[in-house]
Amino acid sequence: MIGKIVASWRLRRASRRYDAGDFEGALAAVRGAMEADPGLPLASQYLGVITLKRGRLDEAADHLRRASAEDADPFVLFQARGALAMLRKRWREAEEDFRRALEAFPVAFELGYPIGLARLMAGDEKGAFAEFVRLLSREDDPLFKRLKRLDR
């Protein structure tokens, strides 16, 4: 029980360090959490996201593969996998992963941008344009409201 409490505290520390841009500190905190609770859910997901941010693509891919087999948060997992695929120039894979993230969290309209970008990079200009229009056509979106005011 103490191990789970310590692990939880260390994951919160990892999150704060990540948010502050201290990615090495975040990695150390996640590894410390895993030492406190070796069966820690989401640890692979945390490690995948952090190592991706550090540009260590192969290591990130390994962690995200493990996270796929664990009880990962699908929104975070597929968003990270989509970003990894974009960095590796695997445009269709990126689009698919971003769409799966959107399925997991349907109000994350901002995912229309990387979906459109992936389609554009894959050579599908018409599909990319449709994604960008869909993204900017949401009447509840603040950017859409600003654009609408400018169009008057």
Image (tube, rainbow, N blue to C red):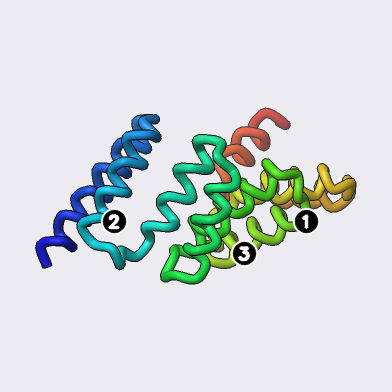
Residue located 76% across and 50% down the image: 90
Residue 40 sits in quarter: bottom left
Indicate the secondary structure of the residue bearing disc 3: helix
Secondary structure at badge 1 equals helix
Q: Is residue 85 above or below residue 73?
A: above
Q: Earlier in the sequence, mark 1 or mark 2?
A: 2
Rendered view: 56 above or below 32: above
The answer to whether residue 68 is left or right of residue 85 is left
- Give the residue at the far left of this rendering: 2
Three-letter code, disc 2: Met
Q: CA distance from mark 2 to mark 3?
A: 28 Å
The earlier-in-sequence mark between 1 and 3 is 1
Residue under label 3: 100
Instruction: Give amino acid for label 1.
Output: Arg
Res 143 visible? yes
Name above or below for residue 150 compared with residue 101.
above
**Is any part of residue 139 visible from this angle?**
no
The residue shown at (49%, 63%) is 66
| Tag 2 residue | 34
Q: How many angstroms separate mark 1 from mark 2 (CA)?
A: 34 Å
Residue 6 on image: x %, y %: 16, 54
Q: Residue at x 27, y 50 (%)?
A: 11
Find disc 1 in the rendering and name its residue.
Answer: 92
Q: Looking at the picture, how far across and down is residue 96, in whole percent?
A: 70, 61
- Badge 1, how many Cα within 10 Å: few under 14, some, many 20+? some
